[in-house]
Amino acid sequence: MAGSTQNVTMWGLPDKKPKVAPPKCFNIASRIQRSGVEQPMTCRVHPVAILKILDAYVRRPEGAKRIIGTLLGWISEGSVVDITDSFPVVHKESSTDGVMMDQDYHKQMLALRQKVSPREVVVGWFATGSEITPISAMIHKFYCTKESQFTPTAVLPGPIHMLVDPALGAQQSFVLKAFVNVETKIAESLLQFHEVPLRVQTSAAEKSGISQLMQARRLTREAAANGSGPKDLASLDGFEGGLKELLGLFRRMREYVQAVTSGRLEGDLAVGRGLTAALCAEPVIDVASVEKLCNSALQDALMVVYLSNLTRTQIGIAEKINALPPPPEN
């Protein structure tokens, strides 16, 4: 691992060399049972966080078996933890010496992320693999401390540990699991990891980005099959694709409404309320108003372009005047 030893803090390695047994851990695949008044905690992970984990795993150093990193997000809707982002943390681990983590890198990356999105805080950490190891228990101990800048709350008293298994199984999909540590009074070094519900949550913006990636992949494959170069996707292509998708949704909605009104299909009250709420949420604007708005925006854009060209011309004339030699003295 590059860098001086001052920037690397060792966890699980004491200053001296006596052998210390690592904390024990249990991988208990059961949900947390709380009282009937409290709601069970659930986790929602966004595709951006998963893509960053997989990208870091592909780019891992030579010889590294797995990667670890920090999970960012917030608590929403009472007892739901949203995992919105992630970043890997430089580390080195071995079965004999324990694990070494670059805490300074973790703090610097967290500070940069919070400048972009102050709402995002540390909610846990991730690791690639299919099981929890004793070294994972050491790393979890770090994220339980104030050095990781994790803040315990009533909903989330301890950091979340998410396992991402990049190995594709029989169903050609990787496995995602989330765990929380439950304190036990038997021994302080005993960690019990209980699995909590986890699902992938995709926002509208992320769906648009993923559709663009899938379209670029399809165009690349078609270009490779035809023996030509791949086509570059411009911003206008994304806008056009979004309009086509919106038009397709309108057509599906119209077909559904026509089938219900004609009696060919039994109507669903939930779908009807959803369509009504979506249509009433947007203001009704006639075509003339939309055309007037577009013309006004176009005129404003043309005026900005004209003023920019005029300013550029004036600056060019001023530079040429200043570059002229001074007149000779009489």
Image (spheres, rainbow, N blue to C red):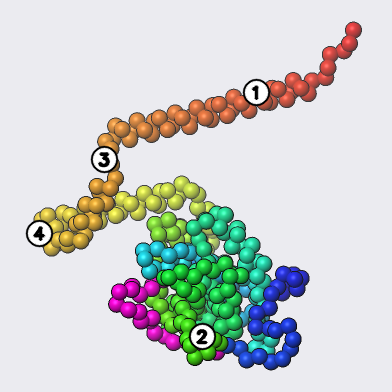
The residue under label 2 is 191
Q: Residue at x 19, y 57 (%)?
A: 272
Q: If you read the primary sequence from the N terminus, does the residue marked by circle 1 or circle 4 appear first? A: 4
Q: Is 125 included in the stretch rendered in magenta?
A: no
Mark 1 → mark 2, Cα distance in angstroms: 72 Å
Q: Which mark's residue is nearer the viewer, 1 or 4?
A: 1
Q: Which residues are magenta?
A: 24-46
Q: If you read the primary sequence from the N terminus, does the residue marked by circle 2 or circle 4 appear first? A: 2
Mark 1 → mark 4, Cα distance in angstroms: 70 Å
Mark 2 → mark 4, Cα distance in angstroms: 60 Å
Q: Is residue 88 above or below residue 16?
A: above
The residue under label 1 is 314
What amino acid is at disc 3? Val
The residue under label 3 is 284
Query: Of helix, strand and loop, which mostly describes the magenta segment?
Result: loop
**Residue 205 lies in quadrant:** bottom left
